Image (cartoon, grey):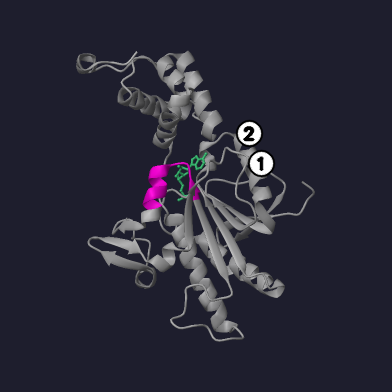
């Protein structure tokens, strides 16, 4: 039943959440997005549920559950999931791993693609949060391509001013998340001085403009990254990727869901494509369809060709 203003005034204590209601809501969240709130994290779930219940002015969690599972509750369900995500991220997070991506993985990919005259490079940042990860990768790839052509000049003149991606190469970076707020921030590409701390001054000069007290990603950088909503729980995910980064996302899923996701990533990668997971994550016990690559504290996984 919706609460009225006087009710709201008198409610200072939290509305009781029974074990049965918690289980229902926990299961619903898991089914919708794969996030699993075990005992260690259930206080976070309870806190967010209390907040959403108040915002919806409802007086019971069962009523809230009924709202979430109704047709009219779709928007509220999206809001709840958004409130449950942890969006912590930073530019150039896990540097040793990104060095492995830039110095070994890209070098090899560019070489093999050039041999096959395949000039398309597709990267997917799955669970991109507010954009620092896909923009970091975009900068690394632009620099790697520029350096590659310093040593292996193209057989024709590149137009001036030199584009970030020398033709005939095409770079597509898909950045996806379940949080619309995070996607909007990424699309905007505006970052504070504190957020920019890991970005050195040469990268700031090449890829950003200063606008008031913030840094704004230059249009040439922004146009390389396409932000879009994708829920990793669903079956239909973007295919034909050379590289997938899904870092610090699987830690919020339980093991069966992690296994399902890694299997989906295998299908979403091109043959011999690469998967990058977070520094506290690994594919150990989740899949045998990838081989681990390790260099200078950086780790990645390469797809092995097996019959699926
Ligand atoms: C901790 S952030 C990691 C951001 C970035 N990958 C990094 O490592 O810096 C986790 C992100 O995963 C997203 N996420 C959680 N569950 C998801 C799902 N089912 N589908 C898509 N994104 C999800 C969250 O919204 C959040 O932005």
Q: How many marks?
A: 2
Sequence-first tag of 1 and 2: 2
Q: Which residues are magenta?
A: 176-186
Q: Left or right? Give the position of 272 relative to 299.
A: right
- Please give the name of the residue rendered at 50% of the width and 19% of the height, measured from the top-left corner: 23
Task: Indicate the quadrant containing the N terminus: top left, top right, bottom left or bottom right.
Answer: top left
Q: Identify the residue position indicated by label 2 in the image.
A: 256
Farthest residue, direction right: 307
The residue tagged with tag 1: helix, strand or loop? loop
Q: Left or right? Give the position of 302 relative to 87.
A: right
Q: Nearer the viewer, residue 89 or 61?
A: 61
Image quadrant in which you'd find residue 12: top left
- Assess disc 1: are there few (<14), some (14-19) or many (≥20) residues with their C-alpha within 10 Å of its C-alpha: some
Q: Is residue 270 above or below residue 18?
A: below
Q: Is residue 297 magenta?
A: no
Task: Find the distance from the CA under tag 1 to the CA under tag 2.
Answer: 9 Å
Q: Identify the residue position indicated by label 1 in the image.
A: 286
Q: Nearer the viewer, residue 117 or 16?
A: 117
- Please give the name of the residue rendered at 44% of the width and 60% of the height, measured from the top-left corner: 135
Name the spot of residue 228 as percent of width and height, x first: 48, 49
Image quadrant in which you'd find residue 58: top left
Name the spot of residue 242 as percent of width and height, x first: 63, 59
Contact check, label 1 and label 2, Cβ < 8 Å: no
Q: Is residue 36 above or below residue 251?
A: above
Predominant SS of the magenta segment: helix
- Please give the name of the residue rendered at 54% of the width and 82% of the height, measured from the top-left corner: 150
């Amino acid at each position: 039943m919706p609460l009225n203003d006087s009710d709201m005034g008198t409610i200072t204590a939290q509305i009781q959440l029974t074990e049965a209601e918690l289980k229902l809501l926990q299961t619903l969240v898991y089914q919708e997005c794969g996030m699993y709130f075990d005992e260690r994290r259930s206080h976070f779930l309870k806190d967010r549920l209390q907040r959403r219940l108040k915002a919806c002015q409802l007086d019971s969690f069962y009523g809230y559950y009924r709202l979430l599972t109704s047709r009219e509750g779709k928007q509220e369900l999206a809001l709840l999931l958004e409130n449950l995500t942890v969006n912590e991220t930073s530019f150039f997070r896990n540097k040793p791993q990104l060095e492995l991506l830039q110095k070994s993985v890209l070098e090899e990919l560019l070489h093999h693609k050039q041999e096959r005259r395949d000039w398309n490079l597709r990267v997917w940042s799955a669970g991109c949060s507010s954009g620092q990860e896909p923009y970091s990768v975009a900068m690394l790839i632009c620099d790697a391509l520029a350096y590659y052509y310093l040593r292996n000049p193209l057989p024709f003149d590149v137009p001036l001013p030199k584009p970030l991606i020398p033709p005939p190469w095409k770079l597509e970076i898909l950045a996806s998340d379940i949080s619309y707020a995070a996607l909007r921030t990424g699309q905007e590409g505006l970052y504070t001085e504190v957020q920019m701390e890991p970005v050195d001054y040469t990268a700031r000069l090449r890829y950003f403009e200063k606008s008031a007290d913030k840094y704004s990603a230059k249009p040439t950088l922004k146009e390389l990254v396409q932000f879009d909503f994708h829920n990793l729980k669903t079956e239909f995910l973007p295919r034909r990727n050379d590289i997938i980064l899904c870092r610090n996302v699987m830690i919020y899923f339980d093991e069966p869901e992690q296994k399902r996701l890694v299997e989906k990533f295998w299908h979403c990668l091109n043959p011999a494509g690469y998967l990058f997971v977070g520094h506290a994550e690994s594919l150990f016990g989740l899949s045998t369809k990838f081989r681990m690559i390790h260099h200078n504290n950086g780790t990645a996984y390469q797809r092995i060709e097996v019959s699926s």
